Amino acid sequence: MASAAARREAGPAEVFLYGAPASLYTAKVRAFLRARRTPYVERFPSHPRYRSELREVVASHRIPIVEFDDGLVLQDSAVILDELERRYPDPAVRMGPRQKLATLLLEVIGDRGLAKAAMHYRWNFPEANEGFLVGEFGRSLRFPAPDAEVARLGERVASKMSSYLPMLGVEARTIPAIERSYARTLELLNIHFCEHPYVLGGAPSRGDFALMGPLYGHLARDPYPLRLMQRMAPLVFRWTERINGAERPSPEFPHRPHGLEPADQVPPTLTAWVRHVLAGYADELIQSAARFDAWSRAHPHAPAGSFVSPEGADQPALGPIIVDFHGVKVEQQALAHTLWLLQRALDFIESLSGRERAACEAWAADAGAAAVLDIRLTRRLTRMRNRLAVE
């Protein structure tokens, strides 16, 4: 836990966010802090406190990490948002069951469902992006520093991150489908934000924050996809500005009440967008769950608390899968972390009964999510010491 002196270092700040501007998952947490007007200070991984204490506390090198002014330290964006929502609730964001289910699925989508586009448009346009990204990564590790040192550090990070493209199935054969899918993603979201300032109506909620990860952290900051979004979907770009600026009210919607849609409504425009994304993502979730079930059968006597990865990797790959991505067969890795997020949606719908469950199942069918919500994991997933484990 943090010392009292260290917690007072930034004065009135209540939250210390250790992350980076180019980090997808940092963007997700930062979106909450800005939209909820939470007193916070952002620090780079180069900060002495991150290097000397926090990495050891969380036993992870991943960002973001959040340290609260009472000494609590958390890693993983979903865990962080759980605590932030507990501490900084917005009374106007009161969800009905359908809205809650939609939000849980949006977090699953934000975790990996847009990763192909986010990584393609970041790493496959070096003439537009490379100089920007090398500087971004380098400065997050050492600043101020000579240009050559910033470039050296930035290139090291860029080389590692771009090496993940094959794991996600991003290759020459799949790129046309990725670009077509992303163009439709922008088109449908632009339609939605023509009618609504946020994903569930008139107030930003967790679904917005989850989508800000890929849609802002990569796709509205990196030079090439930034220009693409501004040209193809200016209202999506305005949504990112609206959240980052904590606009209340938004000038486009001056008379819109601050709150979610009434009567547990999920806007049809959002449902149409979810349907499109899941048409290319549901099979990945289904195949990944099958891979995890195969792991469970191969380790029938693994006690509760056993790491899914024998090396203790925090976000392990489960092995190769072939998935249907909008009609194109994609070879990639099954990634286990998203199954832990999906488990939340599965738990939620299982907790419902009667009319509430029927309403959620009807919405899920309309949104193309029925097959995803039929997934049953053979063992429950949890996180132990910031590693994925089984219960």
Image (tube, rainbow, N blue to C red):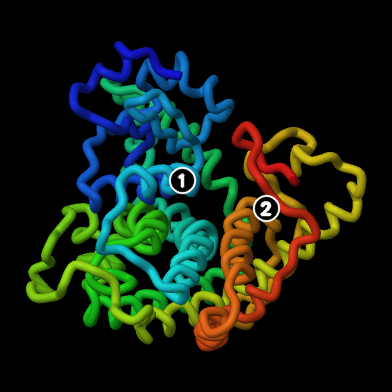
Q: Position of residue 183 (x, y in %)?
A: 40, 77
Q: Up-down: is 65 above or below 205?
A: above
Residue drawn at (75%, 52%) of the image: 318
Residue type at mark 1 is: Ser
User: Hey, which quadrant is residue 200 in on the image?
Assistant: bottom left
The amino acid marked with disc number 2 is: Ala
Checking the image for residue 336, the label placed there is: 2
Image coordinates of residue 89 in percent, x first then y, are 31, 51
Q: Quadrant of residue 1?
A: top left
Q: In this orientation, does residue 139 appear? A: no
> Could you say which is closer to the camera, residue 106 or residue 72?
72
Compared with 62, 149 (above or below) is: above
Count how many numbered circles sit on residues in the image.
2
Q: Is residue 307 visible?
A: yes
Q: Is residue 377 left or right of residue 175?
A: right
Marks 1,2: beta carbons within 8 A:
no
- Residue 302: x percent and y percent? 86, 42
Q: Residue at x 46, y 45 (%)?
A: 77
Q: Which mark is residue 77?
A: 1
Q: Secondary structure at mark 1?
A: helix
Residue 358 sits above or below residue 201 on the image? below
Give the numbered dot on residue 354.
none
Counting residues from the N terminus, which is met first, the one under dot 1 or under dot 2? Answer: 1
Q: Is residue 154 above or below residue 121?
A: above
Indicate left or right for 344 with 144 as reference: right
Asked whether 115 or 159 is in front, the reply is 115
SS state under label 2 = loop
- The 10 Å Cα crowd at callout 2, few under 14, some 14 to 19, many 20 or more, is many
Q: CA distance from mark 1 to mark 2?
A: 15 Å
